[in-house]
Amino acid sequence: MTAPLHEPRPGTPDTQQGMRRRNLSRVMHAVATDGPLSRATVAQRIGLTRAAVSTLVDELIRSGLIEELGPQRPGRVGRPGSALAVSRRGPAGIGAEVGVDHLAACAVDLSGAVRARAVRRVANRGRAPGPVLKELSVLVREVTARAEREGLRPAGLAVAVPGLVARGTRTVVRAPNLDWHDTDVSALLPTPAEALSVLPLSVDNEANFGALAELWLGEGTPADFLHVSAEIGIGAALVVDGKLLRGTRGFAGELGHVPVRPEGPACPCGGRGCLEQYAGEEAVLRAAGLGPGEDRVGLLAERAAAGNTDARRALRGAGTALGIALTGAVNLLDPRAVVLGGALSRLAPWLLPALERELTRRTATPAAGVTVSRLGSDGPLLGAAHSVVRAVLDDPVAVAA
Amino acid sequence: MTAPLHEPRPGTPDTQQGMRRRNLSRVMHAVATDGPLSRATVAQRIGLTRAAVSTLVDELIRSGLIEELGPQRPGRVGRPGSALAVSRRGPAGIGAEVGVDHLAACAVDLSGAVRARAVRRVANRGRAPGPVLKELSVLVREVTARAEREGLRPAGLAVAVPGLVARGTRTVVRAPNLDWHDTDVSALLPTPAEALSVLPLSVDNEANFGALAELWLGEGTPADFLHVSAEIGIGAALVVDGKLLRGTRGFAGELGHVPVRPEGPACPCGGRGCLEQYAGEEAVLRAAGLGPGEDRVGLLAERAAAGNTDARRALRGAGTALGIALTGAVNLLDPRAVVLGGALSRLAPWLLPALERELTRRTATPAAGVTVSRLGSDGPLLGAAHSVVRAVLDDPVAVAA
């Protein structure tokens, strides 16, 4: 994935060529966000002359990234303005997700529309990475083929995984809930020449992609927020000025291992009293007296809704622990908002009261508001596919080349 | 303070004018960091042509920001290269500091040399902001006058305060150890026309300026680190890719109020068991059995060095609490390093063992290394003065205008 080209890379001089690339990106973003737009409106939005924008638009049309919807307002005097939109037959972003109990893939076009989607329920815990990724590649090929039949050109594949990914690599350093260690996804993902091998591949933590989805697709999401997500583990991602804070090694956001009660129960991570010991899925289900089975989070939500005392007490305990860990995070990071995503969004009605009580009584300055994601469990998959689309908008020249 | 101009502001189109300003800044930074340098070397460093660099250098010489040290290597064939250095009679950064028990000011030139400095011991706790800032302005005028006698032109004043400053303002929202609330420093700092009123003024938290000093002046400091500083309170600042993470309201870095033991002693902030209840100056001195008096931190260090059991136990307890709070911070932020500054740097020999033990046993992935600042208590004052100097290097055109 390329970095946004709105800014020259640090340390490199400005050049005419770099300026042109950045301005092409500005046109793409304007049209993708607010299109259809006339050339004149684009020029107004991004602060360039109509002539400069026309040259840029012509180049993007030739590259198949923008299309003209035909003349507007016919009958007026002068050359009719033609509305511009991002191409619905242009590049597509392919997203894929390895979950602890499912696999998924989807294709998203430049306008952000999901054009193909495939999901398979499968228990991946403890399976070797090879067979899991082989099964994932079948779903990827399926959505890729459907996208291609609709005239789209897959521009890249992004894979969300429930584990730590070393920054700038495609290696899952540690995914405790899959039992993967130092797994190079690019080496294991089967890539027959006719399909996946030509796609640029990126791999990232599901909490990171979930936060990006919230940033790009959430309604009214601010550019600075802490995204807390949970499936089996508890992860978080911090977005600052619209950018993900990844950490030096790419491991930022390990909210699940923030100590809540330093003398509490031992955690597999080596610590004691980590948040996951109180608010992780296993801990909450155990506290609620729920044994193994299908969709236990759904069952827990049902019981809590029905007023079951054990379920409510378990969720209150988890909310309190989340509130304590988030007090530390809010004190350190001062985000505009805290967004609960993933499985947490389904349980929010019973987690939020205890969570907000802790945050409010423990923070001197009014705490960041806590909101609940509308994307829920779809976040990571959508974030992955959209990351490819954003890369195209950020550097259209690279895709056209 | 202006943002670095290496990058165009988001959303603004690139222009030739913006490009010129950014390239002027690149020349200034190259000469300030590695000068004296010839024009040819500058051109090589920043990747522009010799001709382009000569035009930029001529403009910076005319503005009095760069000076020629005279021809080098005389006797060689061809036009002799003249070494370029930042002007020692150009703009100066004025830094000032309000401490709980001292006031200070200094002047730093473009090369980073401290050209004037004034410090006064004074107990500021509970004093009204007006008289404190009036006393500070006397020190500021003193160093400003000395800088001007040496031919320097003060380009701005930056004031470090032990409290939370609302982002983009000069208002101290809360400084519990001074008992200041919603104090607008710009309104209270006396500014007779002949001296301070013409200086651009910025105000920031001491932990922020301390971290910036570490970034700009520390030896081998990485571009990603968590800076932990303590005078009376405990603050922190996170630097990511060489930039301060300020938080939405400017309140990021409140490490002192991260919960360490959620059911622990009540804290004035409203929480319980905050880090300051275990590792704040008051808590540590009380635990070590030290009553009121001058330089009690120095006395504590002396006793610990002499093997005093109470002193060592108190510092071990503080180190453990710091280790627990930093485990959370490292899990969330994944910094390259943790740097201990301020009063903590003097006490590091007795804090570090317990601190590092907690960090190591509680974090699954090898923790960020902990280092000790060499700037110690000088950090905030130097960081403030250097912030003005950096603003000049980042946008030389603005100063020349």
Image: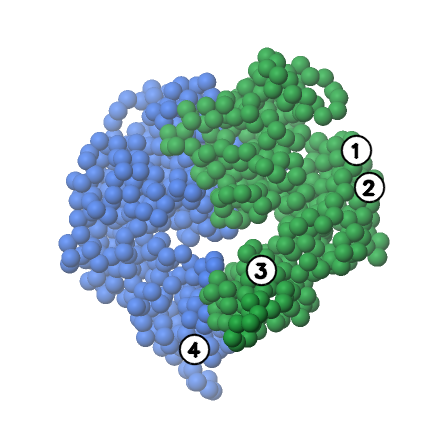
Chain colours: A green, B blue
A125 shown above or below B210: above
Residue A122, label in figure: 1
Do the residues at discs 1 and 2 belong to one chain?
yes
The amino acid marked with disc number 2 is: Glu
The residues bearing labels 3 and 2 have C-alpha atoms spaced at a distance of: 39 Å
Q: Earlier in the sequence, mark 1 or mark 2?
A: 1
| B43 or B168, nearer to the observer | B168
User: How far from the left and from the top, in percent, is residue A293?
Assistant: 75, 21
Quadrant of the image containing the C terminus of chain A: bottom right
Q: Secondary structure at mark 3?
A: loop
| Residue on which disc 2 sits | A135
Residue farthest toward the top in the current orientation of the protein: A309
Q: Which residue is mark 3?
A: A36
The reply to whether callout 2 and callout 4 are in contact (CB within 8 Å) is: no
Q: Which residue is mark 4?
A: B54
Tell me the element at label 1.
loop
Q: CA distance from mark 1 to mark 2?
A: 10 Å
In the rendered structure, the answer to whether residue A186 lies left or right of residue B74 reads right
Q: Residue at x 41, y 35 (%)?
A: B254
Whole-angstrom CA distance, mark 3 to mark 4, is: 46 Å
Left or right side of A94 for A306: left
